[in-house]
Amino acid sequence: LNTAFIVSLASGLTVTLMTRLALPVSTSQAVVGALCAIGVVQQDLNYGSLTRVVICWVTTPIGALVIAVVVYRVVGWLMNALALNLFAWDRLLRIGLVVAGSYGAYALGANNVANVTGAFVGPDMLSPFWAALIGGVSIALGVTTYSKHVMYTVGRDLVRLSAYPAFVVVLTEAVTVHVYAELGVPVSTSQAVVGAAIGVGIAARTTTFNFRILGKIAFGWIGTPAITFALALVLYSLAQTLSLV
């Protein structure tokens, strides 16, 4: 239980820091970074599983980019084939945004709640149901109170999106994360969203990418597991000094 607390505390502090910097980072990367630190000091790190997770991290934004390009063109072709008038198109797009947003939230919950509370599931701790419930409520609270600046980074500062590209981005993110959730691999929803946004920009042939913001986001992706790893080591050493582990 003490090591689970260290993993959660290190991850929470790191993600809070990155959120203050308005960077869309990965809770899965934060948790895995902390778990790696505990695994190293306890000499119980499964390098095979770690390699699998890292490969999925690399392929997540690339896969989302490719899917976004395909979805953008296929859905656009279908909409043109329907020959809808402006009002019908607007109504359909509004419905699509709500459906895609709901699906995206569902996929995010399936992926991220395990990152938040999975370390506390086990004998004499939490059951999967209560861990998922507590994690889900906490995620909802964080969304409503603390996510505005990160939303602006993705939806406004990286590349400006109108309604149709936004629909494609959210749908692509949901599909990408859902696939990895089915595989049981904790991946980054932020990486999927950014990869999808870039894919839509390529498909729409836009040149409005903010590469400075993209560089900051990439730093967040690399820095998150590294910072969490180091922080977990410090917390574990402190807990050992206090005879807590």
Image (tube, helix red, strand yellow):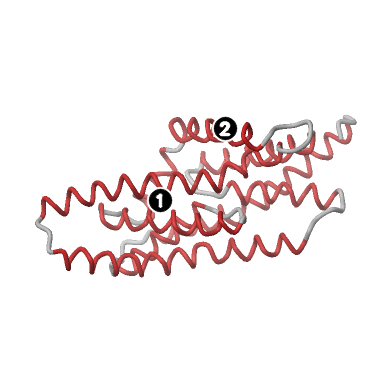
Left or right: 160 in relation to 63: left
Of badges 2 and 1, nearer the viewer stands 2
> 139 or 224: nearer the eye?
139
Residue position for label 2 = 133
Mark 2–mark 1 Cα distance, whole angstroms, equals 27 Å
In the shown orientation, is residue 35 left or right of residue 110?
A: right
Q: Position of residue 225 (x, y in %)?
A: 65, 52
Mark 1: amino acid: Val
Q: Residues within 10 Å of mark 1 (few under 14, many from 20)?
A: many
Mark 2 Cα-neighbour bin, 10 Å: few <14, some 14–19, many ≥20: some
Q: Label 1: which residue?
A: 154
Q: Which quadrant holds residue 54?
A: bottom right
For label 1, the SS is helix
Q: Which of marks 2 and 1 is nearer the N terminus?
A: 2
From the viewer's perspective, tell me whether residue 91 is left or right of residue 48.
left
**What amino acid does circle 2 point to?**
Leu
The total of numbered circles placed on residues is 2
Residue at 58% over, 41% down = 113
- Whether residue 58 sits left or right of residue 193 in the image: it is right
Q: In which quarter of the image is the C terminus?
A: top right
Q: Is residue 209 depicted above or below 6 in this figure? A: below
Q: Which residue is painted at 38% across and 59% down in the image?
A: 197
